Image (cartoon, helix red, strand yellow):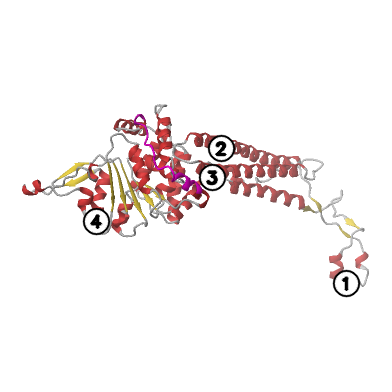
Amino acid sequence: MTPHRSPKLKAIIDTLEQGLIERGQCVRLCLLAALAGEHSLLIGPPGTAKSELARRLHAAFRDARYFERLLTRFSVPEELFGPLSIKALEEDRYERHTDGFLPDASIAFIDEVFKANSAILNALLTLLNEREFDNGAGRQRCPLISAIGATNDVPEDEVGEAFFDRFLVRLPVAAVSGENFGALLDAGRGRDWQAPAPELCLDAGDLARLAGEAATVAVPEEFVAVLAGLRRHFGDLPIQVSDRRWVKIVWLLRVAAASEGRSSVTLWDLLLLPWLTAPDAPRQAAVADWLAARLGVREAFSPARLTRVVEAFEGQLEAELNANDLDYDESGRLKFSAMELAAELADAVGDAKGGAAAPRMAYSRRRRYGAAHIGARVSQIDSLLERIAGYAGEIAARREDLAEFAAHSLWLNEGLTARAGVILASTAAAIDELAARARNARGGFLGLPRLDQDNGVIPEPVAHEVLDTA
């Protein structure tokens, strides 16, 4: 993408956000949806700036026609699509005058969208998805860039669910928090919001160029693997995401990358997925948790898996430190000790004949290990430490990459990227702790009691099945 466009979009975003308290992420995602040719749904109570947001979005596009309507259960098609043409009826044609109505709009806001009857919703399905309106015997092309719907509740009926799926971005909107209540009252003093300057506004040429650049954006295998894992995870939540929706999601993320001048999507773009997949705030939070715990953390070297490997070495060290062998003298006979009491022998034969005072066999001693055994154990831990160091380097690179992404992201606020940063920081700390434990185990193996001469025995690897796949 040309370098100047990101500053232009940043200026538009800053203008649209002015005076809208706690609505910055909504503004950004509605604009991104519009750039991708998709629609947004605002879910929340009245009085939360939903219509204001839509009107501002309209101002970001040059020469864009705006349409707004509040629907009720008594709404009729004429309110959305225009009145019937009397002249066409006289000629036995059933057509509508659509000028100034939804089929003629570039940006549309439909409040209480799910209160409309099924006839209106079915007509809207084609208009939103195909950008076409069935007008009489033919289909009319519609200039719609993006529609913003608003609702208090998510529908559960079949027609409502099909219409719900047409909104790629779903944004729960709540009342301003107590923390920012004062800022809300202060913002209410100045109601003269200024639209973006004409030179900032986007036109059809900007949208076409952006779409062309987005089509060339690469989608790495690592990115697809995370999407596939999330798709499997949705079976447990449960969340239904259609194949059509997955395709639209990737397109929107390509547009996000292109708008920032990137030639490829990154893992951090996936932080937008909660609003693109889950239908409500609780399940969006669950998706955000899943993503935050996995983005940038390679499964083969996750802290949980590394912990099992380190614990296996620690357990092996403890077992070898506590292991005993039978003790023989130079003639090959078991040694006896008069210094130690054979309590178990006394219990067996009684002490009537002084068995407790009799000498007994010292049948065991602390096991000793050859240089080959100790060298093999140290080599195994060195291999583990080398892999841990490599993964610690990966985590450090991921953290730098995330910080760079957050500094230039148009579409994600600092809170979202900061959360992923916290997860990576805690992972890095856990990796450092496990490395220290592994080094301690290495020192323990070096301190094992040694044989005077090496017996050449090489032990079996510890946790070899994990090391081989990590």
Q: Quadrant of residue 427?
A: top right
- For the residues labelled 2 and 3, the Cα–Cα distance comes to 12 Å
The three-letter code of the residue at mark 2 reads: Arg
Q: Is residue 433 above or below residue 76?
A: above
Residue 419's disc is 3
**Which percent across, then down, holds residue 211?**
33, 34
Can you identify the residue that label 4 sits on?
A: 75
Secondary structure at numbered mark 4: loop
The three-letter code of the residue at mark 3 reads: Arg
Secondary structure at numbered mark 3: helix
Residue 448's disc is none
**Which percent across, then down, holds residue 278?**
41, 51
Can you identify the residue that label 2 sits on?
A: 399
Q: Outermost residue toward the top? A: 3
> What residue do we see at 90% from left, 57% from top?
337
Q: Earlier in the sequence, mark 1 or mark 4?
A: 4
